[in-house]
Image: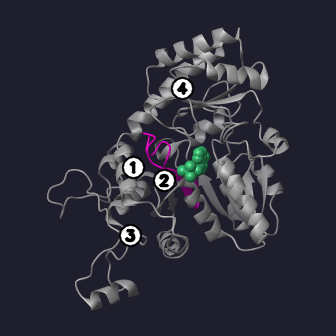
Amino acid sequence: MKEQHLHKDTLVVHEGYEDTEHHGSLTVPLYQTATFSFETASQGEKRFAGAEEGNIYSRLGNPTVRVLEERMTALENGQGTLAFGSGMAAVSAVLVHLTNSGDHILCSRGIYGCTFGLLGIMERKYNIKHDLIRMWNEEEIERAIKPETVCIYVETPINPTMELVDIQAAVNVAKRYGLRVVVDNTFSSPYLQNPLDFGVDFVLHSATKYINGHGDVIGGLLTGNDKEEMESIRMTVQKDFGGIMSPFDAWLLIRGLKTLPVRMERHSSNAEKMIAYLKGQKLVEEIYYPFDRDSSQFAIAQRQMRAGGGIISFTVKGGKEQAQLFMDSLSLIKIAVSLGDAETLIQHPATMTHSAIPEQERLQMGITDSLLRLSVGLEHAEDLIEDMKLAFSVME
Ligand code: PLP
């Protein structure tokens, strides 16, 4: 299907699949196979030589995985997508693709803990350095560029502080210096934000989160705006490092993706109700949710996001002890890392997702001991608020 004018709500259901030879199967069939047989030896030769299109071996491509890839390409307004076995496999593939020994990567000042870990490995083993900086405007970004800088790597909203990067500012600077731009779009999903529309080169997702939405798959997706370049990554870094997605996980993600629009709307409206409650709660110090009118970044949020999504971070009075007491006093809301699931989850970044980051750097990123990250799920907002009320009452 190539109807680019279709709405995202329709694309999530139909894009990339037409039942021409699948026995009338309404849903996308699962091709759970490692390899594909050729009719003749010469057909095999042609496929390896790239002279004939068709399947060879599932590490190089699989029909079920391909439907997911095409669907994501349409949702992110891109030209090609590659599916990986985890979000981190997508992050590492794009960074390996873009960098050589001695290069420099300019990063937003908050990035996912394992991305930070990967950058450390790249520095130690390959002398690929990085800087983490605030990216609220072009000047801040331009000032940090070095002669060795090759790409700008951005998370927005940043996990877990919910700080935004001005995507257009990053792209404007990158264009002036011939740099590539990568955006980790995990927190917004392609339903709420499409970085490629601003001129970004690559957008990636931990598909484990909103794309799947049901907490039962680990996966990653990388979409680019250059079809040939995406195919070249498929046949180099992806094929040879081998971090591919399994057909079954792609099948589950295709199923999860169908409800992305309705889920994102509910996550966002539930989050708004939770924020209204948190604003009146005296034990809450700060609330971080850029799509809120009171946020200093509301103008940027409105320029690049369609709604705020389901992640709220907030600080409670009393530091780590009180933050942990609050978590322990919840019952409906589960203590767990990950996000984007039907279940509302809460975690303490300083001792969980970001605990590997040295304290000083962690504090510079704004991840204090009193910060909590809530992934608002799909339950009824009143039940979630009631759960929080009871937990706060224990702290008083
Ligand atoms: N990027 C962000 C923003 C994340 O939150 C995560 C995981 O939490 C990742 C990347 C890594 O994804 P995965 O756990 O699927 O490897």
38 left or right, relative to 186: left
Q: Mark 3 points at which residue?
A: 58
For the residue pair 124 and 194, the one nearer the viewer reads as: 124
For the residue pair 19 and 125, the one nearer the viewer reads as: 125
388 left or right, relative to 58: right
For marks 2 and 4, the one nearer the N-term is 2
**Which residue range is magenta in the image?**
198-220
Label 3 SS: loop
Mark number for residue 271?
A: 4
Q: In this view, does 186 lie above or below 45?
A: above
Report the number of discs: 4
Is 217 colored magenta in this rendering? yes
Q: Which of marks 1 and 3 is in front?
A: 3
Q: Name the residue under label 1.
A: 253
For marks 1 and 3, the one nearer the N-term is 3
Q: Mark 2 points at which residue?
A: 219
Contact (Cβ within 8 Å) of mark 2 with mark 1: yes
Label 2 SS: loop
Label 1 SS: helix
- Amino acid type at circle 3 is Ser
Taking the spot 30% from the left edge, 75% from the top edge, the residue there is 36
Q: Nearer the viewer, mark 1 or mark 4?
A: 1
For marks 2 and 3, the one nearer the N-term is 3
Q: Distance between the residues labelled 2 and 3?
A: 16 Å
